[in-house]
Each structure stands twice: as structure tokens, then as C-alpha cells.
Image: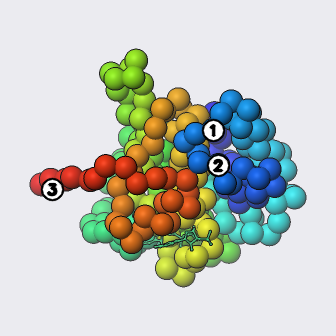
Amino acid sequence: MIPERVSEEQWTRSLRRKRLRSLAPLHLNLHHRRQTSRAMADMTTDRASAGAGADRFVLRALAVPDFHKGFMQLLGQLTVAGDVSEAQFAERVQRLGDDHYVAVIEDMEKNQIVATGSVFVEHKFVRNCGKAGHIEDVVVDQSVRGQHLGQRIVEFLTRFAEDKGCYKVILDCTIQNSSFYEKCGYKKKEIQMAVYF
Ligand SMILES: CC(C)(COP(=O)(O)OP(=O)(O)OC[C@H]1O[C@@H](n2cnc3c(N)ncnc32)[C@H](O)[C@@H]1OP(=O)(O)O)[C@@H](O)C(=O)NCCC(=O)NCCS
């Protein structure tokens, strides 16, 4: 299991050390899975060696108090976030089950949520009742873009889905953002279609 207290700063650094970053996250073989598991274990016990950046930007699961840390305003940089009350927010957070993980990165210097993304694990019938991960709502605050926080979120969510036994993870994005996701290990496949209500 991926513990909520895992810091992605530590994870990314650990992956760099182990030269795993060039691997497509969806195609890790067993050997690399073991290495990654060890890297995650390192993260939970090796905070001190991760440097100051790891302490400033902490990745964890969304929590109810994040309502007062700019979470909804951050989503507003992605799309229409709406006028959500604190009670609605708390109810929605409490409804998140084991198959729905909303990751946030908090800037500990400002007590603000500066990055987020979510993954939903779909239980399917195809692929022997396999599971597929769906990544949604990835956004990084304008003030801290370009510092690999988006990549850390996406790689964490991808690993979460893999850890849950998903055979794939899929997401939709604009053409302009496709290079970003390629750097996170994703490849273009098919096209997106949608109907909005
Ligand atoms: C897209 C977004 C999440 C990227 O977050 P970020 O933290 O700035 O990106 P990172 O620093 O993690 O970028 C990782 C790599 O991708 C590159 N990259 C990031 N955005 C890119 C883009 N739009 N086009 C091309 N490359 C991009 C970075 O240069 C970096 O490359 P490097 O490893 O060679 O240095 C952020 O720009 C954002 O929130 N945009 C607005 C909301 C949005 O469009 N969300 C995506 C919805 S699908």
C-alpha cells in the first residue's frame, strides 16, 4: 500500500538515484516494482536525507481542513470550481472511498495547497475483471509551476493505481499539455470524446 505520509519529493529523488525516472510507469517489470517498493519504503524512513524541498512541499491525501488552504481556489485555475460550501466540501471528502485518491501538495511555508490531482480506480469486467485507473483534475498553482510538482502528483497517482492492481491508467488532456504527460511516462492513444450535461 502507498502510505498517505509518503513524500513525493523523497520518492522522486529516490527514483532519480535509482535511475528509474526514464521508465514508463505503466510498464514496470517485477524487478522494477521491487525497486520502487523499496524506494517507497525509503521515503517513509529517510525523510532527513531528502533535503529542504521535501519538507516544504509535502504530498498527502486531501483532508477536510484543506477547504481553508485554498484547495477550491486552486481547482479554479483548472476549470469552473463553483461556489462550494464548507459543509459540501466536507461531505464530498468523507465520501471518497478506498478507490478514489485525491492527492494534494501543501506548501508548508504558506500553509497553502499548491498542487492536486486525483485517481479513480474503476472495477471492470474485461481483462478478467481487471481494474483501470482514471487520472483527473491535475493542476499546479501558477506561482510554483515548473518545479516538477505536477510531475510528482501524476507519478504518485500512477503508482497508486499500479499498487491497486490496475492494468492501465488513462487520462484526458489538451494537446498543449501532452508533452507534460509524456514526461510523466504517458503515450498518446486514441482520442477523447465527451458529452456535457
Ligand atoms: C500542466 C501543469 C499541471 C504542469 O505542472 P508543472 O508543475 O508546472 O509541471 P512540471 O514542472 O512537473 O513539468 C514536468 C516537465 O514537463 C514540462 N512541461 C510542463 N508543462 C508543459 C507543457 N504545457 N508543455 C510542454 N512541457 C511541459 C516541464 O518543462 C518539465 O520538463 P523537464 O522535466 O524537462 O524540466 C500545470 O502547468 C498546470 O497546472 N496547468 C494548468 C492546469 C492544467 O492544464 N492541468 C492539466 C489538465 S489535463
Asked whether residue 116 appears in the rendered view, the answer is: no
Question: Residue at the location (58% across, 39% down)?
Answer: 27
Helix, strand or loop for disc 3 = loop
Above-or-below relation of 26 to 179: above
Place of residue 20 in the rendered image (x, y in percent of width and height, measured from the top left): 72, 50
Tell me the kind of residue under disc 2: Leu
Tell me the kind of residue under disc 1: Leu
Helix, strand or loop for disc 1 = loop
Disc 2 from disc 3: Cα separation:
35 Å
Disc 1 from disc 3: Cα separation:
35 Å
Q: Which residue is mark 3?
A: 196
Above-or-below relation of 18 to 162: below
Q: Which residue is mark 1?
A: 28
Q: Which residue is mark 2?
A: 23
Disc 2 from disc 1: Cα separation:
7 Å
Q: Quadrant of residue 44?
A: top right
Question: Residue at the location (53% across, 32% down)?
Answer: 164
Question: In the figure, is residue 95 to the left or right of 142?
Answer: left
Tell me the kind of residue under disc 3: Tyr
Helix, strand or loop for disc 2 = loop
**Mark 3 residue crowding within 10 angstroms, few (<14) / some (14–19) / many (20+):** few
